[in-house]
Every structure is written in structure tokens, then in C-alpha cells.
Image (tube, rainbow, N blue to C red):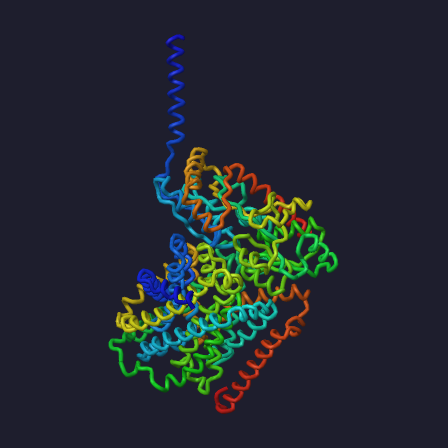
């Protein structure tokens, strides 16, 4: 090997080293804001606070949760989209504001304005009926709805919410018609179900376990690809032959154009937080279903869910 | 019984008592500061409880809750700015009393009424929670809608002398309540593409603007135009501030009635303390033999409104405990906090975790007792606020108002809403238009629209749903009776004073 070649090789190695060092050298110098589009104490907020509590030790700067509640999370999404793509402002995303709202309303952002950093958790959606209502399964629901076309009703947390989207897709798949009654959140919806004012409601298992465990309400199915451990008697809609897959996810988005090495840094350090005992303990207490995905897979999943909801919403418009 | 004693023993451990003391004091302060709400305080406290055992975390949250609702009355009385929406009706007579130098008296009554209302609703909770919760479930959209229509008739009671001005204010309130995404189809109304308006005007900035900012503007105007010094109260007259036998005679019945009304409204999901307090106040005035006293410093007005809003604190826990369905936003957060502790409420809690049920009961009673004690000790120091010259006091309050408005959603937009509402409130004052009807219409309209449209979806457009259902028909009849009553009273007063047309 000639001296020249050695020199060249050395330079290449050095350059590669410099390059990699340079790539990993990005470190935040200012506090990182994690923007939550919902009020303190809500599901998205608790995910963010859990992440901060478990990841703070891996970051040289403070991690700050900022609540910008409003417009089903669209307010916060719009805010983060317009921030600098420097990795210092992140959005807790993957729920209604990402998959459902843009299909029902004109919004100032689209999923292309963001890039995924990682998925943190998933939250299943159950179709729930009242015990004693005669609807104990999807087959019962279909039969009853066909016998009383347009008479049965379901509650949702608002036009364009994920719950609304689930029922739009499901009723279309089942070939039935139901009335849609929007409510302000899960609690009034559950009260309406138990009072017999609506026939079907939807809910996350961790929020409805009181009613499900006491037998007042029955989980009849869920639009996921696998069953949920705590209520494994409830079949997935896919098993029943209906291709419906919608659930709530929570992960982190950064503004589009955030450099790769910045996203990598954030991903790696938050992942350390997710693997920590703190995260696991708190997730256990809060019944969060930890479901890590990398940023690209997370974004792809969100996009395909958004597409399915968009198709159902387009059917509604006709 | 053993479990009860065990619960008492845990609650009264020194460390737990210290937490209760601290959270009660914090609750009163937070409640008293305009813009910092009970809901926000509880929400921010929840992460702290994750690492705590059950009893101290319950004590912390319940202490904040009850004391915060009471704390709102302090600023309502002293500076005409309800610290929380729940105290909006308290300021009507409470501030009049303060202007007459009887602030301490008003605050005493507010504390006693708060204590009574809280106690009454907690007793209800302990005695018949499951039955009441089952009754509350009967309230579907049609029933809620008719109840709210009845509640709207209190606009007439809050209107003061001229009903037409009250109706004008209510119409403005209704109009601005329609700003934002509509409750059923999420179609944006009057938002002009501004995201900050999608959820409508935020309630706290509007409240602060209408009361606090308008009050400051009015006081500033007075001192500029008349050259009069801002009213400073140097000494607190002891005799005038004693609760007399007459005060008690006037207040006891309204207080008890409000205890019922507040408990009733509290256990229905989604209504909340602000509606309860206005209902309690208006019913007291409606039933009074001397309604003309109201709005001019009637102690029974303070008693009625404060008893009603604290009665919500206990009764909102009825559906939470018995059905795992919270009655208002603070109890929704409490429910979440209990979940974190591994406690699932609902019918099974009485079977699976009777110890937790007893702990909740004891914690509620203990937090009430502490609210009473801390509140009583704080009365005299708090009233000293009135000795601070307003030139110094108001800028401080203004800063707190702006900060509070901002903190709701971390949004400067809400600060502008506050300023705008202040100008509106000031303009209304100039024309002698009362602000309370505006506020109550603003509070009542969104749930009214929502429940009416939900009911009409169910009935496929038929209005008969409101008459076919007995509870709903009952409230509509009440509303009709209230209107007839108001009209008759108006006619009578016109006959009495024929020149006053």
C-alpha cells in the first residue's frame, strides 16, 4: 500500500469520524418544549408528563410540557407547524388532530408539515353497549339495526373525533344505519349509555374499566388488529370479517424539515426514557399501553389511518 | 365500623393533616385569585399525587377542591371579581355589602354557607349516593334541555328593575356563546378562521373582563371625573360586621334551599357549580318577600349563592363514586387521580374497596372542617386587603388577571378577550345594563343547544319529546310558571307606581 493510499484511507477514516462525531454532536442548548393540544390531566397530557419525568435525566436541557388546548388539538398542531424546525418544539400527536380532524374540517396543517419522531403508546377503542340492552355482540347490533333502520344511536365525542370515525367506518362495513349523537367527552357519553339514551358508546379500556368490570356495560368489539389482554373475550372487527383498524396513538412529531441528526438525537434519548423503570412504573399506574414505533413507521401508520377515516368521511358527505 | 375508625386514624396522621392544611390554604388562595381556577389547581396537583399513597393524595385534591370553591367568594366580595366562575352570583350582593363597609360580615356568611352547602351534599353522598346516581341517569338530553330552559328564566330575576335591559344582556350573552365550533357538527361559527376561537370565547377571561376590568375602568372614571378619592376603607366597623339575628332569619331558608338545588345540579353530568350558584341566588330572590333588597347588599343573597356552589362539591362526587361518571371537570380529574392510585370507582367500589369509600368520606368531612377553620382564621387578615389603597391594589389585580387569563391555554389571545370583555362590561354599565344575565346566558347556552339538538336527533325532529317525558314536561311547566310569575309581578309594580312607565 502506497503512502498516498494510506494517507487517503486515513483521511477518509478521519473524515468519517469527524462526520459521525459531527452528526452526533447535535445537542439541544435551550429547553425543549413538548406541546400538548389538550388540557392538563387529560390522556395526552399524562403521556407527555410521564415522558418528561422518565427522560429528563438523559437531556442536558429542561423538558417543558406546554398545554395549548383547543379545537381537538388542532390549535397545538398549527402552533408547532409554524415553529422553527430545530428540534426544540415537539408535538404530542397521533390522535384526533392527526387522523380525524383534518378529514372533517379545513385545517391549516397537514401531516406533511410534520415528521415522526417516535410512537409512545397506543390506546384501543372499544364499542360498548349497555348490559341488558340485548346487544351483546356485533351480530346483535347488526340484526337490531337492520330491524330498526336509523333508530339505534351511538354517542361520540364530537363530529370528526376518532370515535365518530370508528362508527362511520364500522356502520359502513356492517351495512347499517345509526344516528350519531355527539357528546362533550367520555363521561356524559357513558352516562347517556347507562341511562338508556343511546345504544352504543365508545371508550378506551383504561377509561371505562369501572363500567366494564362491574358488568354495567359490555365491550362488544374493537377495531384493532389484535385483541386486548384485559378484555380478551371481545373480538376484533377484523376477526369478524370487517376490515376496520382505527385506534388512538400518542407519539411525538417534529416540524417537517427538522434535520435527521436532531430527530435521531431526540428519538434515542426519549427511547432511553421509555425503557426506564420510571416510565414503566408510571405507565402501569396510568394503564398506558406502551407501544414503541420509530418515527417513520409511526408517521406511516398515522397516514394510513387518516386515509381510512377520510374515505369514510367522504362517504358521509355524499 | 372498624374500617371507619381505620380511615379516621389514617386521615388524622400528622403528615396527612399537614398536607390537608397546606392544600386547604392553597385552595383558598388559588380560588381567591381571579384567573386561577380550582380545576387548574387540581389538574396541576395530580402529577404530584402519582408517587403518594391514597389517603394523602385524596386529602390534597379534596382540600384544594372545596377550599378553592369557597376562596372564589373572597375576591367576589372584596373587589367585585369572582375568583372562580362559581362565585359570580356572590359578587352581586357581596360587593354591595363590602361597599357599605360590611365585607367581613359578607365573608363570614359566605364561609358559613359554603360550609353548610358542602356538609349537606357530603351527607347526601354518604347516605344515598347509589339511589341518587340512578336517578341522575334518568336525565337524558330532553330532561337536561328543559331544566336549562327553566334555568334561563332566572335572567328575569337577575335583570334588576328593567326586564328589557336584562333580556338585552342575555341576548348578547347568547350571541357570543355561539362563537366557536358548533357542538354537534363542529361547523365553525363566527371564527373567521382564527383557531383561538374554535372552542368559543374562554370563560375565565370573559368573566374577569366583565367584572374586574369593568370595575377598574368604572372606578378610574369616577376618580377622574369627580376627583373623588377611590373608596378606601380605613377601619372595619366591628358592630356593622356582626351577623345579627335578623341576618340569620333571612339567610337560613335560602341557604337550605340552595343546599338542595346545588346538590341536585351537581350530580347531573356536565352542568357544574356556576349554574348551581345562579340558580340558588335567583330562587332565593324569587321566594323572598323583599326581593328589592337583592342587588343592594342582601346577606341572604350571599348565603344562597355560596351554599349552592359548595353543595356541588359533594354531590358531583355522587355519580363519580357510584357510577364512575364525574359530575364536573374537577371531579373528572379526581376520578383520574383515583385511577392512578389503582382505585376504580363505580358500583363495585362499595364491595371491593369499602375501605376506600370510608377514606373518601372521612377525607371529605375533614377537608370541610379544615375549610371552616382555616377560612375563619383567615377572615380578618383577608379583609385588610380593603385597607390597601386602590391605586396600589388595582394594578396588582390587573397583572394577576392578565396572567390568569393567559394561563388558561397559554394564549395571549385570551388576554385580549379579557380586555375586550372589560370594555364591553364598562359600556354596559354606562347604559345601566346588568352584566349577570349576560354571563348566565353565556353559561347556559352551549349545554342548552347541545342537549336540545341531541334530543331532536333522538326524536327525529319532533318537539313532542320535551312534553312526552314527565321530568322534562315538569321543568317546562316550572319555566312557564316562572314567566307568569314575573309578568304578574311586573304588572303589579306598574300599577303601584302608575307614573313609572
Vertical arrangement, residue A313 with respect to residue B91, above or below: above
* Residue B410 appears in view: yes
Residue most extreme to the front: B2
Residue B365 lies, in percent from the top left, at: 39, 69
Task: Judge by depth and name the residue closer to the eye, B44 or A28.
Answer: B44
* Residue B423 appears in view: no
Name the quadrant containing residue A182.
Answer: bottom right
Residue B64 lies, in percent from the top left, at: 38, 63
Task: Give the residue drawn at x 56%, y 41%.
Answer: A301
Vertical arrangement, residue B263 with respect to residue A177, above or below: below
Residue B230 lies, in percent from the top left, at: 29, 73
Q: As drawn, is A305 to the left or to the right of B294?
A: right
Residue most extreme to the left: B234
Task: Judge by depth and name the residue closer to the eye, B470 or B37.
Answer: B470
Residue B250 lies, in percent from the top left, at: 41, 84
Residue most extreme to the right: A147
The N terminus of chain B - image quarter: bottom left
* Count of numbered circles in the view: 0
Task: Judge by depth and name the residue closer to the eye, B396 or B105.
Answer: B105
Task: Judge by depth and name the residue closer to the eye, B336 or B442.
Answer: B336
Q: As drawn, is A266 to the left or to the right of B188?
A: left
Amino acid at each position: 500500500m502506497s503512502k498516498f493510499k494510506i494517507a487517503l484511507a486515513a483521511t477518509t477514516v478521519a473524515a468519517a469520524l469527524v462526520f459521525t462525531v459531527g452528526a452526533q454532536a447535535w445537542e439541544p442548548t435551550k429547553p425543549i418544549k413538548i406541546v400538548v393540544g389538550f388540557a392538563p390531566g387529560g390522556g395526552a397530557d399524562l403521556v407527555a408528563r410521564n415522558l418528561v419525568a422518565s427522560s429528563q435525566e438523559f437531556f442536558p436541557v429542561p423538558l417543558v410540557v406546554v398545554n395549548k388546548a383547543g379545537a381537538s388539538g388542532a390549535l397545538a398542531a398549527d402552533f408547532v407547524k409554524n415553529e422553527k424546525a430545530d428540534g426544540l418544539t415537539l408535538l404530542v400527536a397521533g390522535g384526533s388532530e392527526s387522523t380525524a380532524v383534518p378529514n372533517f374540517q379545513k385545517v391549516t396543517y397537514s401531516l406533511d408539515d410534520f415528521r415522526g419522531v417516535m410512537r409512545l403508546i397506543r390506546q384501543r377503542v372499544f364499542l360498548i353497549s349497555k348490559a341488558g340492552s340485548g346487544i351483546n355482540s356485533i351480530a346483535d347490533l347488526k340484526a337490531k339495526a337492520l330491524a330498526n333502520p336509523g333508530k339505534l344511536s351511538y354517542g361520540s365525542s364530537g363530529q370528526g373525533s376518532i370515535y365518530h370515525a370508528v362508527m362511520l367506518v364500522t356502520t359502513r362495513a356492517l351495512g347499517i344505519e345509526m344516528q350519531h349523537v355527539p357528546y362533550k367527552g367520555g363521561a356524559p357519553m357513558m352516562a347517556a349509555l347507562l341511562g338508556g339514551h343511546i345504544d352504543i358508546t365508545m371508550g378506551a379500556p383504561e377509561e371505562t374499566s369501572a363500567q366494564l368490570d362491574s358488568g354495567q356495560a359490555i365491550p362488544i368489539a374493537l377495531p384493532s388488529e389484535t385483541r386486548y389482554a384485559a378484555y380478551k373475550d371481545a373480538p376484533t372487527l377484523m376477526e369478524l370479517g370487517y376490515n376496520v383498524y382505527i385506534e388512538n396513538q400518542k407519539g411525538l412529531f417534529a416540524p417537517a424539515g427538522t434535520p435527521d441528526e436532531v430527530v435521531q438525537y431526540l428519538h434515542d434519548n426519549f427511547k432511553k426514557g421509555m425503557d426506564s423503570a420510571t416510565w414503566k412504573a408510571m405507565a402501569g399506574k396510568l394503564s398506558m399501553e406502551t407501544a414503541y414505533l420509530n418515527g417513520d413507521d409511526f408517521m406511516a401508520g398515522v397516514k394510513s389511518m387518516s386515509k381510512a377515516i377520510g374515505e369514510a368521511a367522504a362517504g358521509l358527505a355524499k | 365500623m372498624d374500617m371507619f375508625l381505620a380511615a379516621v386514624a389514617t386521615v388524622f396522621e400528622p403528615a396527612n393533616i399537614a398536607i390537608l392544611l397546606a392544600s386547604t390554604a392553597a385552595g383558598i388562595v388559588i380560588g381567591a385569585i381571579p384567573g386561577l381556577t380550582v380545576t387548574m389547581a387540581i389538574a396541576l396537583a395530580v402529577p404530584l399525587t402519582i408517587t403518594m399513597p391514597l389517603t394523602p393524595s385524596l386529602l390534597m385534591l379534596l382540600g384544594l377542591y372545596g377550599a378553592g370553591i369557597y376562596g372564589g367568594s373572597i375576591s367576589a366580595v372584596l373587589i367585585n371579581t369572582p375568583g372562580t366562575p362559581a362565585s359570580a352570583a356572590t359578587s352581586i350582593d357581596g360587593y354591595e355589602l363590602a361597599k357599605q363597609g360590611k365585607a367581613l360580615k359578607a365573608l363570614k356568611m359566605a364561609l358559613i354557607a359554603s360550609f353548610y352547602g358542602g356538609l349537606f351534599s357530603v351527607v347526601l353522598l354518604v347516605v344515598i349516593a347509589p339511589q341518587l346516581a340512578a336517578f341522575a341517569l334518568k336525565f337524558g338530553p330532553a330532561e337536561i334541555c328543559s331544566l336549562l330552559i327553566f334555568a334561563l328564566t332566572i335572567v328575569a330575576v337577575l335583570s334588576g328593575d328593567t326586564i328589557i335591559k336584562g333580556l338585552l344582556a342575555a341576548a348578547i350573552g347568547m350571541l357570543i356563546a355561539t362563537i366557536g365550533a358548533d357542538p354537534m357538527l363542529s361547523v365553525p361559527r363566527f371564527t373567521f378562521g382564527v383557531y383561538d376561537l374554535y372552542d368559543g370565547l374562554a370563560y375565565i377571561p370573559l368573566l374577569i373582563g366583565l367584572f374586574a376590568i369593568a370595575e377598574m375602568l368604572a372606578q378610574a372614571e369616577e376618580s377622574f371625573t369627580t376627583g373623588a378619592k377611590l373608596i378606601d376603607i380605613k377601619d372595619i366597623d366591628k358592630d356593622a360586621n356582626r351577623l345579627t339575628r335578623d341576618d340569620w332569619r333571612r339567610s337560613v331558608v335560602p341557604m337550605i334551599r340552595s343546599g338542595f338545588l346545588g346538590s341536585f345540579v351537581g350530580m347531573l353530568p356536565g352542568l357544574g357549580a356556576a349554574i348551581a350558584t345562579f340558580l340558588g341566588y335567583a330562587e332565593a330572590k324569587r321566594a323572598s318577600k323583599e326581593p328589592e333588597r337583592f342587588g343592594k347588599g342582601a346577606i341572604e343573597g350571599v348565603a344562597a349563592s355560596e351554599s349552592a356552589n359548595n353543595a356541588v362539591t359533594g354531590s358531583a362526587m355522587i355519580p363519580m363514586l357510584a357510577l364512575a361518571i364525574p359530575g364536573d371537570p374537577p371531579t373528572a380529574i379526581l376520578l383520574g387521580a383515583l385511577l392512578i392510585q389503582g382505585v376504580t370507582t363505580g358500583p363495585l367500589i362499595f364491595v371491593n374497596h369499602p375501605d376506600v369509600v370510608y377514606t373518601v368520606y372521612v377525607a371529605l368531612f375533614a377537608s370541610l372542617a379544615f375549610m371552616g377553620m382555616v377560612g375563619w382564621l383567615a377572615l380578618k387578615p383577608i379583609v385588610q386587603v380593603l385597607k390597601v389603597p386602590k391605586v396600589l391594589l388595582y394594578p396588582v389585580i390587573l397583572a394577576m388577571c392578565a396572567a390568569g387569563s393567559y394561563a388558561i391555554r397559554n394564549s395571549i389571545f385570551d388576554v385580549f378577550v379579557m380586555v375586550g370583555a372589560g370594555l364591553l362590561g364598562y359600556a354596559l354599565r354606562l347604559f345601566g345594563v346588568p352584566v349577570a344575565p349576560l354571563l348566565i346566558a353565556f353559561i347556559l347556552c352551549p349545554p342548552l343547544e347541545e342537549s336540545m339538538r341531541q334530543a331532536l336527533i333522538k326524536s327525529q325532529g319532533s318537539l313532542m319529546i320535551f312534553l312526552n317525558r314527565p321530568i322534562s314536561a315538569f321543568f317546562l311547566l316550572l319555566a312557564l310558571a316562572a314567566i307568569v310569575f314575573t309578568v304578574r309581578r311586573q304588572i303589579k309594580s306598574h300599577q303601584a307606581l302608575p307614573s313609572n312607565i
